[in-house]
Image: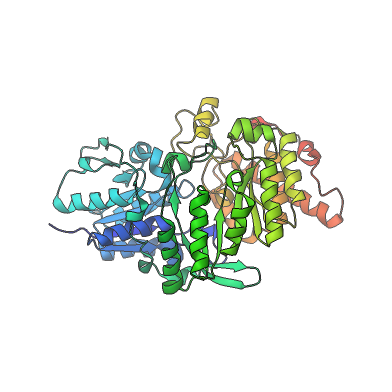
Amino acid sequence: MKIPRVMLVVPPGGYFAERWSGGSMMPALGIQYIAAVLETDGIDVEIVPSHVLDLSWEDLARKIESDRPDVVGITTTTENRFLSFRVAEAAKAAFPAVLTVLGGPHLKNTARDTLSHVPAVDAVISGEGEETMRDLVRCLGAGGDLGRVAGLSFRRPDGTIQENSPRPLIADLNTLPLPARHLEPWDRYNFSMEVPGHGVLPAGNMMTSRGCPFTCKFCATPSNWGTKVRSLSPEKVVAEVEHLADRYGSRAIWFYDDTFNFSRARTAAICDLIIERGLGIKWFCEVRVDILNKSLFAKMVEAGLYHVGFGIESGSERICRDIITKRATLRQAYDVIEWCEEFGVNANPFFIFSHPTETWNEARETMSIIEDLEGKCETSVAILHVYPGTPLEERARAEGKIPKDFSWSAENDRRVVVLPAAQGHAPLYLDRLTWAQLCEIMVRFSVAKKSIRWTRKIPKVLGSVRSFGDVWRYLVLFLVFVRFKAGAMLGVGSKRSTGGGADELKLSRKVAV
């Protein structure tokens, strides 16, 4: 039995590389877990993080041609999917015998769509990839039938697409080996976190749970990971923290869980172990404010919590309750912000604009809250994206905002609006807010955070233009930016948004989209 050789690739460049372009970059945990499982099975596996190694497309093609792997696995997100498709194309051109396999969060609900429209992709893993990739490689080595690999969709030699039975989620995450961080060029990531009073600390990232029991309509986590949360035991969590500290020198940890505090008892147990062992680490996590109490928060701070993220999403109770179906209240979020002020923790609330049926007055409510929090919090603002498999996608298709024949594999579909240079290649959900109003929101909060890097953005923006509609949208964004900056320089107008500037542009919603 020949044991196939596997190369796991992160595409060059892209939206997430841009997000971490300040010299510090977070390693991708998904392919590290897959690599670790393959290694445990005695399979020769290599991780190639092209974006970190500064590999050009030509460099990557030469590497594949030289190494001649049997399988190239490519990590895929909705924002970066077209770069993943391009990796598959480059791999096939460099070494036609290679089997190209895509996996990642984008593919859970788009396997057939991808295989139908991207000839260079031979197979797609839907859902968790560790066991499916291991079984795929075993099957190839034994010369078996890929039709027996649960969780796999693939194209047979006659061109027909076969979607195998789904693979059950991994019931016990404690059975997984540690992510194969040793296969990464760790120093090249230079992953660090700035901790007040401690400076910039070397950091590591880890995920201690998968799944989310909540029902936010825009979120893909329940579809991808399930609504039943599966988690590492507190002992396993702290052992991995110690591993990151001892082997990689990490003094800060980014917990990448969707809801770190899904279980109060487990969270408390993790904190108790960190405190008992005197680890002295600092860490970030994301929480749900409606299941967090002050006593647990105090213990988290004692264990090293210095920065906490949580979704407020909208300042409108109607939007949160009826549209997002989010049970957490604004009062509960304010409680957490007050605790953060009391304990010296950085609060990072998340806000989203352009929810279904959201009016300009409701958007202004949210803007007012964000501006009231200035100086107290590190707010994050985004325009609502549509992801495959979410209730929001179903709604968008029913409303015609995403055409019923829309393909997630068609890069230049002018019927949907994307801002790949600024927001990644996920479609924006546009409803009642005009484009000019959305531009005002983006500019107002990007300028305040000094997060627009125009000299670097302009070439990317120009390269992403697909149509006159794109030109128009970027022009409106630029005009809003100029007007906002001019107003700031002249000191005219209130800090509060009146909505007048956006309305005065008299831009119809029909033209905007």
Image quarter in which the N terminus is found = bottom left
Q: Which residue is pictured at 41% across the width and 50% down the height?
A: 76
Report if residue 384 is visible in the image: yes
**Left or right: 343 as drawn, with respect to 217:** right
- Seen at 45% across and 48% down, the residue is 77
* In the rendered image, the vertical position of residue 383 relative to residue 178, given as above or below: above
Q: Where is residue 147 shown, x and y percent of the image? A: 21, 40
Which residue ends up furthest to the left in the rendered image? 1
Task: Give the quadrant of the C terminus.
Answer: top right
Asked if residue 54 shows in the view, the reply is: no
Name the residue nearer the viewer: 303 or 463. Answer: 303
Given residues 348 and 98, the one toward you in this image is 348
Quadrant hosting residue 320: top right
Instruction: Judge left or right: residue 52 versus residue 370.
Output: left
Where's residue 167, x and y in %?
A: 30, 41
Q: Quadrant of residue 453?
A: bottom right
Q: Nearer the viewer, residue 217 or 447?
A: 217
Residue 137 % position (x, y): 23, 53
Please provide percent x and percent y for residue 347: 66, 55
At horizontal 58% and vertical 45% (from top left) the residue drawn is 291
Residue at image position (61%, 35%) is 430
Which residue is at the far top? 398
